Structures are given as C-alpha cells and as structure tokens.
Image (cartoon, rainbow, N blue to C red):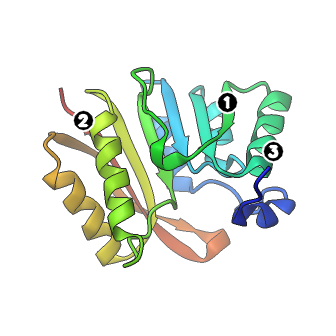
Amino acid sequence: MKKVAYEGYYDEENYFGNPYPGLVAFFANYEARGTILDLGCGQGRDALALGELGYKVIGVDHSNVGIEQLNQHANIRELPVEGLVGNVYDYPISAEIDVVLLDSMLHFYKNDLFKETQFVENILTELKDGGIFVNCILKGQQREDTLKKIIEESPFEWEILLDDYTEYKEANAEFHLLAVKKRS
C-alpha cells in the first residue's frame, strides 16, 4: 500500500477541523438533496457534515488513512456517506452525481495551472445538465479569476448559485465559495 503525503497529517483525527460555515449554510439552504461527489475529501470534514444534512455523499481521496477514518465515522453515525480510495483527477462523474465539490483542491500555482485547469474543464464537461459544481478556494483574486475564466470559457451555460466568502477561523483565513449550476 503506497503512503501519500497527507497520511502523516491524518494521524491526528479531524486534522483539518470543521467544514466552512458558508459551505454548510449553502447546502443546508439548498432544497434539492441528491448525490454529492466530494473530490479530495480527506478525512471527510465536508462529506460527513453534508451526510448529516441528508445528502448521499461519495468521497474520493488518495489517502487510505483519510478514507478509513471517513468510513469509520460515517458507519458510526449511520450516514449515507461512502469513502473511496482513488485518483480524483480521473475519477468518472456518473449520471447519478448531482453535485461535484472541490474544497481546497485548487490553488492554480504556476506548476499546477495546466493540470488543475484540465481537471476543472473535465468536471464541467462530465457534469450532467442541471448538475452543480461547488468550489472552495483560499481567497485570492488571481485564483478566483482563473477559476471564473475556466467556467466562462467552457462551452456550457452556467447559473451562479453562490459567489461569496466565508471566514474560516480555524485557519485564520477567508475562503471564496463558488457554486454554479449547469444549464440544460
């Protein structure tokens, strides 16, 4: 079994803390409950919270340790959440997926710009009509502009459901939340 970088962090339960308040508020107020694909779910801070709200959640991460912890907590709490070990960059987005969530997955640093751009483009293409793409990214104009440009230049039409910021006290930082719905 290959050990990945984040597994050292996951020695500490709940290493990354609680989900962003703004993210939880968005999903709590969104009426349609469906299936969320949480790519890069780690220990499941978002997946577990969204499962508590009544969503079915499939979490994918490359960390065996993180996925084991997510599945253990989901089972104890009897939540409709399943963690899978996999490569988030090529995980297929099936027709059962209503929402794709990326939380702190994208940084758009120079060395990752091409890979992350392709990643988002693939998600936007594979997402079904009426599906929602939700991204949480550390506040920063260049990162936010890069993401919005990828969405604007995609061959699809998008309805903006959320374009806001949320404070994350545990990291002493603000995060940009963007949720867009693919128009059919």
Q: Mark 1 sits on what residue?
A: 81
Tell me the CA gap for discs 1 and 3: 12 Å
Identify residue for label 3: 69
10 Å crowding of disc 1: few (<14), some (14-19), many (20+)? many
Residue 18, image x and y in percent? 68, 56
Question: Quarter holding the C terminus?
Answer: top left
Q: Secondary structure at mark 2?
A: strand
Question: Which residue extends farthest top?
Answer: 96
Q: Are marks 1 and 3 in contact (CB under 8 Å)?
A: no
- Gap between marks 1 and 2 measured at Cα: 24 Å
- Circle 1/circle 2 CB separation < 8 Å: no
Q: Is residue 30 visible?
A: no
Q: Earlier in the sequence, mark 1 or mark 2?
A: 1
Q: Earlier in the sequence, mark 1 or mark 3?
A: 3
Residue 93 drawn above or below residue 139: above
> SS for tag 3?
helix
User: Label 1 amino acid?
Assistant: Val
Q: Which mark is residue 182?
A: 2
The residue carrying pointer 2 sits among few (fewer than 14), some (14 to 19) or many (20 or more) residues within 10 Å by Cα, namely some
> 33 or 40: which is nearer to us?
40
Instruction: Report x, y in % for residue 21.
Output: 56, 55
Left/right placement of residue 164 relative to residue 65 reads left
Mark 3 is surrounded, within 10 Å at the Cα level, by few (under 14), some (14 to 19) or many (20 or more) other residues, namely some
User: Could you tell me which residue is drawn at 33 percent across and 33 percent down?
Assistant: 127
> Which callout, 2 or 3, points at the residue further toward the start of the chain?
3
The mark tally for this picture is: 3
Q: Is residue 16 positioned above or below 85 on the image?
A: below
Residue drawn where x is 16% and y is 54% of the image: 152
Question: 25 or 130: which is nearer to us?
Answer: 130
Which residue is depicted at the point 14% across and 40% down? 157
Q: Would residue 129 be seen by someone viewing this image from the given angle?
A: yes
